[in-house]
Amino acid sequence: MKILVTGFDPFDGEKINPAIEAVKRLPDTIKNAEIIKLEIPTVFNKCAEIVEKKIAEEKPDYVLNIGQAGGRAAITPERVAININDGRIPDNDGYQPLGEAIRENGDVAYFTQLPIRAEVKAVRDAGLPAEISNTAGTYVCNHIFYQVQYMRVKKFPNIKAGFIHIPFLPEQIVNRPNMPSMSLTDIVRGLTVAITAIVERDGEGDIIAVEGKTH
Amino acid sequence: MKILVTGFDPFDGEKINPAIEAVKRLPDTIKNAEIIKLEIPTVFNKCAEIVEKKIAEEKPDYVLNIGQAGGRAAITPERVAININDGRIPDNDGYQPLGEAIRENGDVAYFTQLPIRAEVKAVRDAGLPAEISNTAGTYVCNHIFYQVQYMRVKKFPNIKAGFIHIPFLPEQIVNRPNMPSMSLTDIVRGLTVAITAIVERDGEGDIIAVEGKTH
Amino acid sequence: MKILVTGFDPFDGEKINPAIEAVKRLPDTIKNAEIIKLEIPTVFNKCAEIVEKKIAEEKPDYVLNIGQAGGRAAITPERVAININDGRIPDNDGYQPLGEAIRENGDVAYFTQLPIRAEVKAVRDAGLPAEISNTAGTYVCNHIFYQVQYMRVKKFPNIKAGFIHIPFLPEQIVNRPNMPSMSLTDIVRGLTVAITAIVERDGEGDIIAVEGKTH
Amino acid sequence: MKILVTGFDPFDGEKINPAIEAVKRLPDTIKNAEIIKLEIPTVFNKCAEIVEKKIAEEKPDYVLNIGQAGGRAAITPERVAININDGRIPDNDGYQPLGEAIRENGDVAYFTQLPIRAEVKAVRDAGLPAEISNTAGTYVCNHIFYQVQYMRVKKFPNIKAGFIHIPFLPEQIVNRPNMPSMSLTDIVRGLTVAITAIVERDGEGDIIAVEGKTH
């Protein structure tokens, strides 16, 4: 089995992005699955072109995109990608879309094919906080999540894909009062057990668990 | 013009739900639009049946569902409804779905037809906090939002519909440290200007504004 | 009985300070107590000179200083004033002390003489959030609280004095995500019932209640 | 030089207390200072008796008490200890004082003798979040901090003493949404550099830095 795991480069004035730092430090093999690691730019569309090319080359069974969610305290697998580009800030190429569709002929949204409840359980069992998130935002994180789902429908029907948001690193918040963070070691450990859960649930779907949100 | 505005009854052990309290106190007319007010139960499916019956009777131009989002500090118009019932807690009839589709033949998600940027701007211009939300959760709030969108596709193509989440009332948080709230007077005022914005933008679509979220 | 209630003018770039706005709107009489209202500048020492002059003139039984605590969700009576000026930002005259004593011959700290548990109970009974705070910070709020206690020891042994911090107004946070606030109406109502509790407990000390903090 | 560092045992239903876990893992020597480690119970008075006995035996130059501050995101050196026992919950022996003095003949408060600004700078320079705190609460943490200051005045005039609060561990918050935490590795690292700063500033007092709080 092959899993393509991507991480974004730094954005929004940060000097580091925990996403790519964590992805680089993942083991090369997790439970017999080969881990292919890819850095992608925090740039609308360009990030998707790079991922698409890599999928064509590597033919992975799974695609997992990792992104920074500054302010979140937990590792948060995402449930759903939505068809909108709406930037609070410009991307790393200076482009700031305001409420446009990602794909004119795409669905309003796609659910992940990944076992997000099992991922959350695995991370918690490893002693780290995790929660299902029902929004990946409207920026480049949601964008790549949506684009890979769109590719799945249009070109690569055999892949299963999803997204995990991770907290800031401690070094990013030394001057930000009351902001949660997670050590890089713990993020790598959390992603590793989440990927382990993905591999273990292969072909079986997700577990059943109480993970809903009232809002 | 006619606008049907619904509010839920109390749930999750609360004695009061700011949603129905605020809806009851809305003016009967806002900018020439007649406001039809409807209390609905915090019960999966049953709430939708009641709304559907009312839509059939009243033939409103707009349907706006209001719900409590305990913990949020702002009035938050919702962007998207997703096809899932996933209860952190049971509904008021004791039913707790865990990850089932709302409608087997429904889309994964529907975007609101309401001008959410204009609503947010109107509330802020009135001196109250507002933000677009990209998740209405996976409980009865998202459920009714989704169900009305589904009705729109299947039965009532002329309605435009959407959802606004509102904070706790101060009286609900007297024993909850660090929990934000909003006074009922301000919630009613905020909803009134948001509805005014909906009426004013009728036929013109939303405004353009920077309201995206990175996650 | 006479109660001197002070409120600060705006600081830190704000256009309004809920403290003086609320003080201005207090009733002139609360439970037979005459309420003397005084605006004071957010300036170290100068604010104390103005209060001292007013105390000499009016000979109040109680002095209650009110200040804005941006970020707090509740009305928070303060327990203790500490002998330090330590400014995160300069005051309104441009002075920014960094860790100096307020009074070289003053105590390290003074406890309030006000019945803070009774104040908290009264505010909650009125349906508004309240908590005892164990720090008034190290800026002008703590400064005036400390200075009045020092005056009490040195010059005006008959007064009883204390401080209440209040949240931002909604209009101050329209562009600050996830920031709690309280309506001016509710702040005025909360302060009024807190002052009522002070009057009612006159000569009896505080009530007994569980209001401690683990940190 | 000798530094006595204490850590509390678990309380409030927790199975672990990061304070004692971190203390146990500190190096035995930091910058030529011998580190004496001591576990103390989360029990009013008893914890002080144990510390007093150890001070008498070991004659340390510094006493540093470490405690858990669940909900804080940063390592927070405390500025001031206040003369009150006010328990939100009972201690580990079932005793819950409600607003009594710790020492009838003690001062209202004592400031730490430790260089808290230098500690904060050292922790931040190590890439971890730190802030000065102006309240150690009213429970056993503030109690031991106050008691050691009282001992200093009454019995051990040569010691310098202080307190540092630390966040929850990740494993303590797996089921607490939006709660910040810090890895044990990072807490140990942060305490080590804070103690290094204490040793390096010995005899020189604190640095000057902007670390005040408006409230």
Image (cartoon, coloured by chain):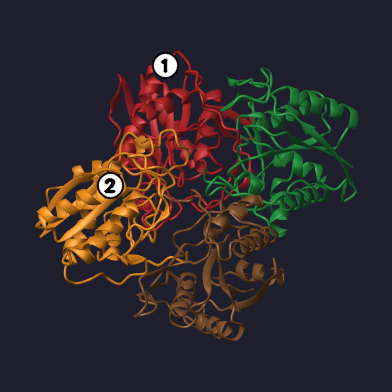
Chain colours: A green, B red, C orange, D brown
Residue occupied by mark 2: C187
Residue at 47% across, 24% down: B117
Residue at 42% across, 43% down: C89
Q: State the image coordinates of residue A177 (x, y, percent, origin top left).
A: 52, 48
Q: Is residue B23 visible?
A: no
Residue at 81% across, 42% down: A24
Q: Is residue B158 visible?
A: yes
| Circle 1 Cα neighbour tier, 10 Å, few/some/many (<14 / 14–19 / ≥20) | some
Reply above or below: A99 against A79: above
Q: Secondary structure at mark 1?
A: loop
Check whether the beta carbons of the residues at disc 1 and disc 2 lie within 8 A of each other: no
Q: Secondary structure at mark 2?
A: helix
Query: Closest to the observer: C8 or A139?
Result: C8
Chain designation of label 1: B
Residue at 12% across, 48% down: C28
Could you tell whether D111 is left or right of C44 in the image?
Answer: right
Query: Closest to the observer: D118 or D168?
Result: D118
Q: State the image coordinates of residue A208 (x, y, percent, origin top left).
A: 68, 52
| Circle 2 Cα neighbour tier, 10 Å, few/some/many (<14 / 14–19 / ≥20) | many
Residue occupied by mark 1: B202
Q: Nearer the viewer, mark 1 or mark 2?
A: 2
Reply above or below: A192 against D194: above
Could you tell whether D136 is left or right of B28 in the image?
Answer: right
